[in-house]
Amino acid sequence: MKKYTKLIVAAIIALVFIGTFVFLWQKSQPKEVIYSELLTEKRDIEKTTIITGTIEPRNEVNIKPQISGIIAELMKEPGQTVQQGEVIARVKVIPDMSQLSSAESRVRLAGINLQQAETDFQRMEKLHAKKLVSEEQFEKSRQQMKQAVEEKAAADDALQVVRDGVSKSNASASSTLIRSTISGVILDVPVKVGNSVINSNTFNDGTTIAVVANMQDLIFRGNIDETEVGQLVIGVPMKITIGALQDLSFEAALEYVSPKATQNNGANQFEIKAAVKVSDHRNIRSGYSANAEIVLQSAQQVVSVPESAIEFSGDSTFVYVVSGADKEKTYERRHVLTGLSDGVNIEIKQGLKEGDRVRGTQIISDEAEN
């Protein structure tokens, strides 16, 4: 019994050894190299670049008060539409004490002058009735009284403006009412009721009450690398896509390329602007992130092959032209002159014609991978 057991074990070991040897021998045999085949064909090739930027209104207008004071009332909120001249806010005036004192003094002085002018006129009127003064002297006295009346009214108006920010004579055009200078959408109202505001003057820009912009006149603003800026032409069409608005794209036209570069992470870049064509029913918000696709170069209906078929050797480019079929298939290494590439397909200027077969990448079988 022990003798048979030893024979069985020996047979198993021999089978394992032979099987391993056969497996290793098969693995060591050279595998047939199989390549994919590609056909040259005519197609349009475009070299494009993608620029990241934002959508902005062409002009944003800061609405500022004409007088200093405190915000008493806000009539509008961000997102609302306003027309030119429409009231956005009302300011309560806090009078300057020196200006108030000066205005009150002017009123008192104008009152004294008016009283004196009226007395003089009444006297001249009596003398004129008795033919004791000339017509010229009488008219001069009348003129002086009228001037005194106007000065008193102007002094009263000035006092009301200093004290209240508005007078009876100009209530409709009151400087306490902050009006929009353009028609558009309110993008921001950076103040609240009770905030102090100052008017624009020589020493400061004044407090911004609201920011208004025409959201139908939009631009794309972004930066392009210096290696590509030389290929841009003013007026070239662009395709704008906005990340927040999926599956939507807009047409644009390049209208500005900065003449000066800026540093961005160590790279020289140039600012560009493009006019965006937006349909009226689209609600585009200021500051949307967007991508602009620009065609830098294009070639129409040129002979091309996938770039994976090209072999680069120094400054030269080659392809392997396929001849024959099956076992008789051969590969001829041929020099070609290439042109424009879009990253997938490349233009062939010389060396190939439409319909030629060229060798592609090697096909790796599942067996070979294992």
Image (cartoon, rainbow, N blue to C red):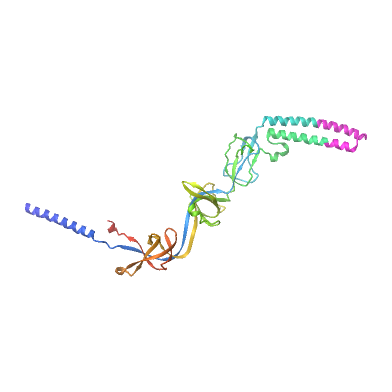
**Would you identify the image quadrant in which residue 365 lies?**
bottom left
In the rendering, at what x and y percent does residue 132 appear?
A: 92, 34
Asked if residue 22 is positioned above or below residue 87 in the image, the reply reads: below
Tell me the residue at 6%/53% (across/down): 3
In the rendering, at what x and y percent does residue 58 appear?
A: 58, 49
Q: Is residue 54 left or right of residue 162?
A: left
Viewer can see residue 48: yes
**Would you identify the image quadrant in which residue 80 lies?**
top right
Q: Which residues are magenta?
A: 114-143
Tell me the residue at 90%/33% (across/down): 127
Tell me the residue at 33%/61% (across/down): 362
What's the magenta bit mostly, secondary-structure-wise? helix
In the rendering, at what x and y percent does residue 59 appear?
A: 59, 47
Viewer can see residue 245: no
Outermost residue toward the right in this view: 131
Query: Camera-side residue: 258 or 63?
Result: 258
**Would you identify the image quadrant in which residue 364 lies?**
bottom left
Asked if residue 263 is positioned above or below residue 34 in the image, the reply reads: above
Query: Camera-side residue: 181 or 88?
Result: 181
Asked if residue 126 is positioned above or below residue 257 in the image, the reply reads: above
Outermost residue toward the front in this view: 314
Asked if residue 8 is positioned above or below residue 265 in the image, the reply reads: below
Q: Would you say residue 91 sits in the magenta stretch? A: no
* Total residue callouts: 0
In the rendering, at what x and y percent does residue 116 appear?
A: 82, 30
Q: Would you say residue 142 sits in the magenta stretch? A: yes
- Quadrant in which the C terminus is drawn: bottom left
